[in-house]
Amino acid sequence: MNRRYLGHRGATDVISFPLDEKNAVEGEVYVNLDKAREQAGKERVPEHEEILRLVVHGVLHLLGYDDGTVRLRLGMKRREDRCLRALGCGKGMKGLS
């Protein structure tokens, strides 16, 4: 999907597609469960937490947030952490990968 729709090489952990460009909150979020499991092991977090982080990340993209630079990725991670804490999980920021 990453290559087909975005022209990026390799697998991605999450990808989102707005369904209506006028109302970008409507969309689809696809989580690569294999990548989520791999990242959860690497970051030493529960799989369900990593999957939830990826869903939140995809929804943030639907809301218009970008992570194309180091500065933007840092802001995205902060937003992810706030959302995860509001949902009752999350232990702070993961590294910028």
Image (spheres, rainbow, N blue to C red):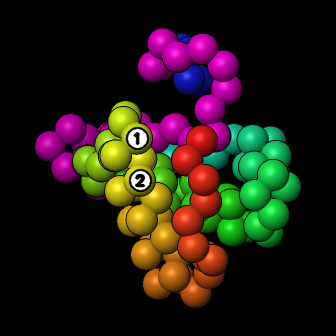
Q: Are marks 1 and 2 in contact (CB under 8 Å)?
A: yes
Q: Mark 2 highlights which residue? A: 74
Q: Position of residue 60 (x, y in %)?
A: 37, 55
Q: Position of residue 66 (x, y in %)?
A: 32, 43
* Label 2 Cα crowd, 10 Å radius (few <14 / some 14-19 / many 20+): some
Residue at left offset 55%, top offset 47%: 96
- Callout 1: helix, strand or loop? helix
Q: Position of residue 30 (x, y in %)?
A: 58, 43
Q: Could you tell me the amino acid type at mark 1? A: Val
- Residue 47: quarter of image: bottom right
- Give whichever of 21, 74 is nearer the camera: 74
Q: Position of residue 27 (x, y in %)?
A: 38, 47
Q: Could you tell me the amino acid type at mark 2? A: Leu
Q: Is residue 64 left or right of residue 29?
A: left
What secondary structure characterizes most of the magenta part?
Answer: loop
Residue at left offset 25%, top offset 41%: 20
Residue at left offset 47%, top offset 84%: 86
Q: Mark 1 highlights which residue? A: 70
**Residue 24 seen by the camera:** yes
Q: The N terminus lies in which quarter of the figure?
A: top right
Taking the magenta stretch, the answer to whether it contains residue 14 is yes
- Give whichever of 95, 67 is nearer the camera: 95
Q: CA distance from mark 1 to mark 2?
A: 6 Å
Q: Is residue 70 left or right of residue 56?
A: left
Residue at left offset 21%, top offset 38%: 21
Q: The C terminus lies in which quarter of the figure?
A: top right
Tally of numbered discs: 2
Q: What are the residue bounds of the magenta stretch?
A: 5-28
